[in-house]
Image (tube, helix red, strand yellow):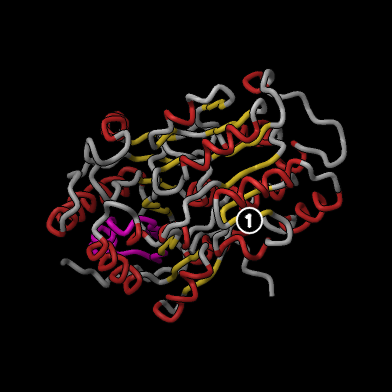
Amino acid sequence: MVSSTNRINASHCDGLMWFGNVDWWYHNRGHASTRMATRLARYVPTVWINSIGMRIPVPGRTEIAWTRYTRKLKSSFKGLKRTDAEGMWVYSPLFVPLFSRRAIAFNGFLLSMQVRWLMRRLKIRRPSVCISMPTMTPVVERLPWVSVVFDRCDDFTTLPEANRALIRDLEIRLLGRCDHAAYVSQELFDREREAVPGAQFIGHGVDFDHLSRCRPIGGKRFEPPGALADCPRPIVGFYGGMDEYRMDVPLLLKIARYIHPGTLVLIGPLQMDLSSVLAEANVRHLTQLPPEEIGRYAAQFDVGIIPFLRNEFNEHCNPTKLKEYLALAYPTVAMRLPAFERYGDLIYTADSHDTFITALGVALSEQDPDIGRRRRAAVAGDSWDKVSHRVGRMLAVPGIEPASS
């Protein structure tokens, strides 16, 4: 292992390298990391470096394996591009798609050269780095930074098909190298807070003003977008990334059949095999929408759902969509997870398929507009700007106001 403890002695950075946990070109851009990176790009040049992943898709074992290979190959040819809307740079790195210790170390060397080139190209001399994926740890160790922030969004040792021991070793190294760790999972924060002097629980923000405008409480519903105009009601919906380690396919089938002839709407990129669900006559799938468009579509839901598997990986997740559902003020039905406990009196949670369907029936019959107001009030003080500024201060980004006392 090559380890660099060199730090750039500067009060502020002049650019950010953001080692993302998704690929900008085909994953869900509503993820917390993309929300923060795009906002910090307003202050300093920011490069989103697409994820190199943590596991190899295996045809016959990994769902939609060939689709994963194809989309990554297409992304890799994009190189360095600047986004029009955000003014952020996006880079698709060249790497060896293997995840042994030797391959990860080699990728650290290979990617460090690419990062040096990016910094020269963009004239960044005092970079800070935010890193989400532990497989990028060797890159961080090889280069000097003003500040290193570990975006501790998930416990990746629990990701199916990943090498648990190897990923844990990388996470430990990164926790030891970083200056700050930013947590969205209270459980992970409580477990690791003593390991990093700069550990902070930041949670999630929400585009509150936008979402609340999309769905007035007690008023007339806006006309649905064309793709949903002919959907029979009730509309029960989900949006976001759909992965085989998150989504409960048998539960989705039961939901679709329970609400028939109403409509189950799924919005987002298909990252798993959902053919059995999509075969149901009352299921409508829409491809990925930009975050600024999601509100118009999600506002048409009568009930929002979070039909996640109750597994080890999801136990440490904190879906951004929960606060968004609350801002939209409609009923939410979710499988019970630790992140939802804080909002237990505002949402319906279930421990099994049967109790989920029962809760869905109650949610569909909800009539009290006051609970919608309480849902909205619970997240009214949250914003992505506030969360991003906290992380920006960790990253020594200039121009961000100090935290208020």
Q: Residue at x 48, y 31 (%)?
A: 277
- Residue 236: name its quadrant: top right
Q: Residue at x 86, y 48 (%)?
A: 368
Label 1 sits on residue:
349
Q: Is residue 315 found left or right of 100 in the rendered image? A: right
Q: Is residue 346 visible?
A: yes
Q: Secondary structure at mark 1?
A: strand
Instruction: Judge by depth and name the residue closer to the eye, 255 or 337.
Output: 255
Label 1, residues with CA under 10 Å away: few <14, some 14-19, many ≥20: many
Q: Is residue 127 found left or right of 208 in the rendered image? A: left
Q: Which quarter of the rendered picture does the C terminus lie within?
A: bottom right
Instruction: Judge by depth and name the residue closer to the eye, 391 or 291.
Output: 291
Task: Report the residue that reaches farthest toward the front.
Answer: 354
Q: Where 263 sits versus 3, above or below?
A: above
Q: Position of residue 164 (x, y in %)?
A: 26, 62
Does the segment drawn in magenta span residue 135? yes
Q: Residue at x 48, y 24 (%)?
A: 279
Q: Is residue 43 visible?
A: no
Magenta stretch, residue numbers: 127-149
Q: Is residue 255 found left or right of 150 in the rendered image? A: right
Does the segment drawn in magenta span residue 17? no
Instruction: Judge by depth and name the residue closer to the eye, 39 or 53.
Output: 53
- Residue 1: name its quadrant: bottom left
